[in-house]
Image (spheres, grey):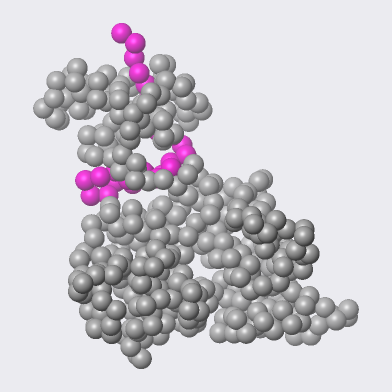
Amino acid sequence: MNHIYIARSSAVAARPLGDEMVIMSALDSTLFTLSDVAAVLWQAADGRTPLDEIVRQRVCTAYSVDAETALRDAEEFVRALAEHGILLVASQPIPSPSPTQDGTAASAAGDRR
Amino acid sequence: MRMAPIETPTQTVDAFPAQDRHAGPNGACLPLTIEIGGLPIRLRAPDAAFRALLAGRYSSFLRPDSRAEMEFELHSAAPESLHTDQKLEVVCEQGRWQVSRGDFRASFDLSTRRGHLSFVPNPYSVDTLLRIVHSLLLAPAGGLLLHASGGIRSGRGVLFSGVSGAGKTTLARLAPSDVQLLTDEISYLRREAGEFRVYGTPFSGELGIQGEDVSAPLGAIHLIEHGAENRLERVPEAEAVRRLIRNTLFFAREKHLVADVFSTVCELARRVPVYRLEFVPDARVWEMVA
């Protein structure tokens, strides 16, 4: 199985506000708001832990969702964030600070405000 | 590039002593020092008539004896040397900021705190430059400029924030006589000793109502819209951040500065109550909010 690794971009500012995580891109000053599940993925995006492990350990245990569905949704979500340049997605661990994006982003809609 | 906080001026800044009261030997450049939000900026304009125009426009904010945090040389530019239909552009390359628009071109360095402005003389280009420079200097100091009108009543600042047409000027005009007007267009906020303070500005909107040179702790921000009746509703913190970000004047894309502004807006939404205010345009609305 090919692992996916995710890391937060250094060109963003993020702040938890109530139940939401609000993220601002320095590239174009757009704002993103993450729901609680999405915020879990965001906070776990350390560049070293594979996405499937994050989903198994942090999402499936906290939310009643099967691993296959959760991973599929998570992959779609992280690729959407990668498209907006606020998350880095790679097939290898991403050193910190993460220098590049490997271009695996696919088309999907993010929660862009 | 990380700018030094304006509370701790560098030696370079201190190198601008209070201005000379007399013109130099060549008869040039009696400078004007304009202080907004506690931040004095000096302008050296060679043309006496234009200096008089600026002195009138910023009369409440002139500080003849103040040192300056930043200094600009103003030069007249021939209209043909500028691209008159150009929209505002702000770029920063290796610490040098370049700001240009159809009617002016400016460059400045926030570390040496010196800059130049070439323009077809009109006060609007000076106004735009001052807004941009203030926004950049305020960002690392925990302040920002907000599209909002406002006033001080009973010692507390109240702001009305919204896009063009939302009613900022209308609410400024409806202010009762015991309100000190801060601005009808651009509000100046900075964090001081753990609280947000709001300052009056000379930056005016379409009706040209200038703010007074006053300041007060900020009591509340109202996100305004016209409605069928006066109605006030507290806005949750995350929504307040989203709305306030949209109404913040900011021009830089440097990630440190963007992060500073974002952090300031988050703190603002955490510390200052933000409301959605629907209002009908008569004086009763002020009694609801201040």
Residue B97, compared with residue B204, is above or below; it is: above
Q: Magenta span has A9?
A: yes
Q: Magenta span has B245?
A: no
A78 sits left or right of B111 in the view: left
Which quadrant would residue B217 be assigned to in this image? bottom left
Of residue B65 and residue B164, the one placed in the foreground of this image is B164
Image point (88%, 80%), residue name: B25
The boundaries of the magenta stretch are: A1-25
- Residue closest to the far left: A64
Where residue B82 sits: x, y (%)? 73, 58
Where residue B124 sits: x, y (%)? 61, 70
**Res. A34 visible in picture:** yes
A61 sits left or right of B11 in the view: left
Where residue A106 sits: x, y (%)? 38, 23
Q: Quadrant of the C terminus of chain B?
A: bottom left
Image point (64%, 74%), residue name: B123
Image point (28%, 52%), residue name: B238
Where residue B9 sits: x, y (%)? 60, 65
Which quadrant would residue A60 be assigned to in this image? top left
Image point (59%, 84%), residue name: B59
